[in-house]
Amino acid sequence: MSNQLTFDVSTIDQPSSFKDERFDMIHQLYTEAKQDRLAFWNNQANQLVWQKKWTNTLMWDRPHARWFSDGILNAADNCLDAHLTTNAKKTAIIWESETGDVVHITYEELSKLVNQLANCLRADFNIQKGDRVTIYLPQTPEAAVAMLACAKIGAIHSVVFAGFSAPSLAERIKDSSSSLIITALDANRRGKRIPLLNMVHDALKQTPTPHVPVLTVNGGGENDFYSRINAQPTQCQSEPMASEDPLFMLYTSGTTGQPKGILHSTGGYLTHAKYSTKLVFDLTPSDIFWCTADVGWITGHTYVVYGPLLNGGTILMFEGTPDYPNKGRFWECIEKHRVSIFYTAPTAIRAFMKDDPSIPQQFDLSSLRLLGSVGEPINPEAWHWYYRTIGKSRCPIVDTWWQTETGGIMLTSLPGYHPMKPGVAGAPLPGLSIDVLSQDALSLQNTRGFLSVTEPWPSMTRGIWNNTERFKDIYWSTFDTYFAGDSAYKDDDNDICVIGRVDDVLNVAGHRIGTMEIESALVAHDAVAEAAVVGVHDDIKGQSIAAFVILNCNHQESPALLESLKAQVVTSISPIAKPKMVIVTPELPKTRSGKIMRRLLKQLVEKTPLGDITTLAQPDIIPIIQKKVELS
Ligand code: WTA
């Protein structure tokens, strides 16, 4: 898969406001990391509060890393208690609801809520260190409280994005064998109320443990969240956690129908969360940091909750969506809360670009000083729009490449240090080694190859819950080093541009979705005999989903059937996985060994040249599918 690339990327200098202050500091970090990588990471880990310091920095038994392993610490203590002597009255969370209500929560208040919930988990639900707790909550402060309360007592939280439907939730509850579910009666979404508690009840019926307790915000009854926690003391003894004890697991999509429970450790994860937030976003005490990601994704874990709180920052948490009830909602939030650092996804940026350009101009965005992008490649056009229209050519943009598995940001151009190249994520952060490799694991320059992290790093995933073999197979069987599943190229300055996934994982509006998950949902429909799903280019979402289905013989194609197939995906996975098009076809393009050639389906939809089709078992199927695509 290697082809020579020619590219022409204009370089943009860092705005002057950042240059001098940070250049020397970052230069020093790169120098230190180069001289002695482990000593460098010791320094970063030392920024946390440890109950017992470690002596052993790294034990590396590929693919198993143990960082700071004899050290002891607690994540909630680091996020909250560590700030109480100096910053108790500082706002930790500014929360704005979809309806526009605003709540400010200080570090002291947040700490009390967390302690109360932690006490409740222990006393009322007998949750012990190592138990799993599923959190299925909207983007509300209770989500952060729930995560931190688990951390306080050493329970492993598994946050499930509240947009997932009951069967997906059930799968995650089952796989993690959670002892408790924390949810809310409902969630606000674009003026509608989504009945989360009902979904939990539906999900539990599909698990072997239908009687797992459910603690519910606004749920009433005996397991009402606030009634329970209000009865608890506001002090709580934190659980001493070994650095390698898991802090959380988070499910993400892979190439099979089964999502992977990605595990993160305590000490290593927190080290990178604290370090990367401070370094990449230049977070200072007076900043208002807004990361628009939902807590249900890794970005929400690391840059809504852990990273900013570890640094004693103030975060804005927004329950709503960018364009509800009007298309100026995001900019209104920035103006209203004087947001200084804004971190969002290219999909949102592209959607804004399509709208009336005068909308952002109606708002005072002068509080912004740094912008970020995450989740998918940002095309240069969107980059420039973001830079000029939102940042007024004053704010650096950090295009941050990372993954659920990496725990925190891995590649970016650092404000005040690297020139920015629109569309190119940039360089590895100090302390990280990342390269672009050929199939033979040779380092490539100016040639497309596979992205690989070539040295262990503190926040690397410690594995897949209950599935070490799968962990080894996915990430460690291609190269000796970590295989990220992305293709990329490295330019003459060693800056890395990440192009996209090389596996059967889609990236729709920055959300990772496995093709197999959608295919399984489709074939579960009575009418479907076989299904193949591909990601096709979409101007706004990056990719959208095209599904090809073969119907069972007693079913006929009709508009109603196509709608019901889409609905099937929504109810069994999530609205985010809804196919944009469903195409009924009499056959799928397969190799002689029976493997579906998804590449061809993608090319047919995108109308790009088909290339080599000699391996096809039935080449004459191609014009038939082509015709169906044209008609759809
Ligand atoms: C993609 C999100 C290009 C990539 C933090 C990766 C990106 C996947 C970028 C991880 C970026 C993320 N440029 N591609 N700046 N950031 N990706 O696990 O394909 O939800 O493998 O983590 O998103 O998605 P995940």
Image (cartoon, rainbow, N blue to C red):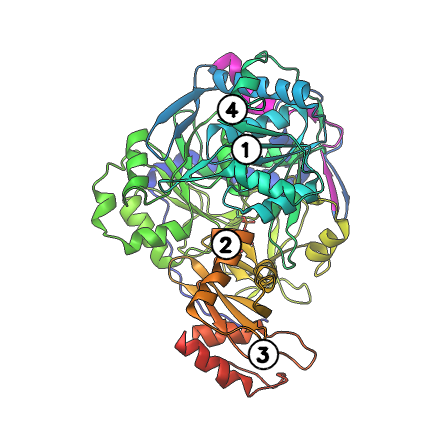
Give the number of the disc on residue 580.
Answer: none
Name the image quarter holding residue 320.
top left
Viewer-nearest of discs 4 and 2: 4
| In the image, farthest residue toward the front | 554
Measure how far apart labels 4 and 1 are at the Cα level.
12 Å
Identify the residue at image location x=66%, y=67%.
439
- SS at badge 1: strand
Q: Is mark 2 within 8 Å of ligand 1?
A: no
Name the image quarter holding residue 366.
top left
Pointer 4: what residue? 220
Q: Which of marks 4 and 1 is nearer the N terminus?
A: 1
Q: Can residue 23 be seen in this view?
A: yes
Pointer 3: what residue? 589
Residue 406 vertical placement versus 337 (above, below): below
Q: Which amino acid does label 2 sit on?
A: Val
Please say whether residue 76 is one of the residues in the magenta stretch. yes
Viewer-nearest of discs 4 and 3: 4
Pointer 2: what residue? 570
Q: Earlier in the sequence, mark 1 or mark 2?
A: 1
Viewer-nearest of discs 2 and 3: 2
| Image quarter of the C terminus | bottom left
Measure how far apart labels 1 and 3 are at the Cα level.
44 Å
Give the number of the disc on residue 183.
Answer: 1
Q: Residues within 10 Å of mark 2 (few under 14, many from 20)?
A: many
Q: Give the range drawn in magenta.
A: 64-86
Q: What residue type is labelled 4?
A: Gly
Q: Residues within 10 Å of mark 1 (few under 14, many from 20)?
A: many
Please say whether residue 435 is one of the residues in the magenta stretch. no
Q: Can residue 496 be seen in this view?
A: no
Report x, y in % for residue 604: 47, 76
Measure how far apart labels 4 and 3 are at the Cα level.
54 Å
